[in-house]
Image (spheres, helix red, strand yellow):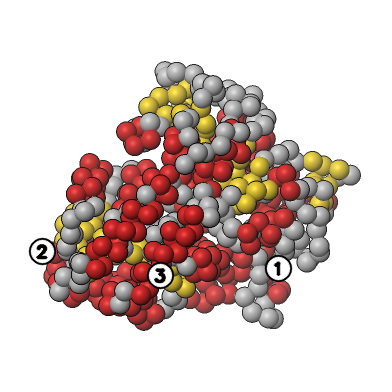
Amino acid sequence: MLQKKNGRYEVYGNPITERQTRAADAWKDMLARKFNYDPNEKFNLTVEDHPYGTEIFGLKNIVRNGSGQPVDKKNGVIVSTIRMGFGHYRIAMAGVSAAKAMGFTPYWLDLLGIPGISTDVINWCNTNYSKYSRISQRYPWFDKYVWESLTTGEPSLPGLDQLFNYMTSTWPWRFLKTEVKDFKMSELFNNLYGALPSDMPILTSHMWNCMGAVAGGMTNVVDMMFDNWPMAFQLTEGAKHAVQSPSGYYGFRVMRGFDDKGKILKPTPSDALFFTGHHVDHELVENIEADCDDRMRRMKAKEPRRFLLTMGGAGAQRELFKAIVEHVIPLVKQDKITLFVNLGDHKNNWEWLQGELKEYKDLIQTHFTWEDTREFTDSIRKKPAHGLHVFLHDNTFHAVYATNYLMRVVDVMITKPSELAFYPVPKIFNARVGGHEMWGAIRGAEIGDSTVEVRTIPQTLQAIDMLTDYDDLLTMFCDCIVKNKSIGIYDGAYKSVELATGKKFKR
C-alpha cells in the first residue's frame, strides 16, 4: 500500500515532494468528482463462461451483478487486464494459458468489462493516450520531440529541457510522482477488487489492475510487467513484479532514472522483483521445436515464405502498410510469398485496405470468424499456403488471439516492437510507436529471434527481401528461438503463476 510520512507519499522508502503529494491527492479527488465515486459502492461479482475464451482455455469470466456462480478460490487464478492497445490483453492471455497448463482454472477480470468508475476513468485516460499515439505517427516532429520524450522520460535533444520539464509536469511516466498519481487514481477501484477473496492468486497485466488490487486489500498480487524500458509507474508496493528481461530487472531494482531531478534512489527490495522471462502462451512455448522444424521444412521445400503482418487500431502506420502490401503483391503473384494480414477488430482498417487492394481482389481470401481462422490455420500446419489472407474479428479476444494462433504456422512476423517483441517467432521489427518500444526491439535483436528495428520504409522492404530470398537469417532466428527455450527465456508466464500460487511448472 502507498505510505505517507511527514506529509509526503513514499514508494519503497523514496519520498516525493509535498507539492507532488498534493498534486496526487488532487488528481484522485478530481476524478472522484468527475465520475461520481461512491466509497460505499458494492460490487456483486460472479462467474460465468467467458464468451470467447471458454472454448480455447476453459476460461471463466468475472462479471458484475450477474447470475453466475461465486468466485471459487480453491483452484482458481484471476487474470486482470484492460484493453489499452492489444499488448496488455496479450500478456493476460499468456497468464491464462500458463495457469490452465499448470492445472488451474483461469478467471478473466477485464476492468473495462465491469460497469462502474473503473470503466469511466480508464476510457477517459485511454482516449487521450490513443489520440497522442496517432498524432505521433502522423507528424514526425511530434514523435521525435514530444512523444519519444514522454514515453521514455528523457528529452529528445539537448536544449529542450525546459519544454521537456513542462510536458512531464503533467504526464511523466518514468518518474515516481506519476507512480503515486496512478496509485491514487487506482484507489478508486478498491471496492471492485475488495469484492474478491483477498488472498486469491491474481495476475495483472497493467499497473492500474495491479494498483487497484493492492488498494482493494488483495495480498497475493503478481504484476506481469510489460515493455523492456523501466518506468516508475509500473511499480506497486505490495505486489510482486514479474520482469521479462535482465536489463529491465536492473532498471527497476535500482529505480534507474525514476527521480525527476536525477537523484539516486533507494532500490526496490529484491523480494518485490523477479526476473521471470518473457510472458508467452503455453501453446507457443511447448511447440517451439516442432514449429521451427516446420519452418525449416518449408524453407528446404521452397514453399512460399509466410509473412504475418499485424496492424493496430489507430491506423497510424497506414503509409508503411501500404508500402509493404504494394511491395509484396508481385511476390505473392509469383508464389514466393504468402501474406497474412491481421487487422484485429478494426473494421475501418479493412475498409481502407479494400480500397488499396481493389486491383487485387482475386488474390484476397478473408477470414472474419474465429471458426474460419482456426480451421484455416489448422489446415496449413503441414500443407502449403498461397495467396493473401486477411483476418478480421468482431471482438477483442479473438482479434488478439488470432495473431497468437497464426504465429505457429508463419515463418516471419512483421510488427512494431510492442509486446509481440517477446514472442518466439522470427520477426521483422518495423518502426516503434513511442520511445519505450525501442527497448523491446533491442531485446529481440540481442537474443537472436528478430531483426533490429527497421525505422524507414526502405529498410523494412529490404528486410522482407532478405528473409524471402535467403535462408541464413531464418535459420539463425529459428536456432536462437530453440536455444532460448532451453534456458527458459520464454517461461515468464509459468513463473508468474508460480509466484502467485507456489506451484512449480513441470514441462
Going from the N terminus, do you reach mark 3 or mark 2 first? 2
Residue 116: x and y, percent?
A: 52, 33
Q: Amino acid at mark 3?
A: Met
Q: Locate the N terminus by quadrant.
A: top right
Mark 2 residue element? helix
Q: Is residue 129 above or below residue 158?
A: above
Indicate the position of residue 7 as horizontal and vertical percent values: 86, 45
- Observer-side mark, 1 or 2, equals 2
Q: Which mark is residue 476?
A: 3
In this picture, residue 476 sits left or right of residue 164: left
What is the three-letter code of the residue carrying label 2?
A: Asp
Q: What residue would you read off at disc 2?
A: 362
- Looking at this view, name the residue that lies furthest to the right: 6
- The residue furthest left is 362
Give the percent coordinates (x, y) of residue 379: 19, 49
The dot on residue 165 is 1
- Above or below residue 292? Residue 334 is below
Task: Give, as a three-letter code, the residue at label 1.
Answer: Asn
Label ID, residue 137: none
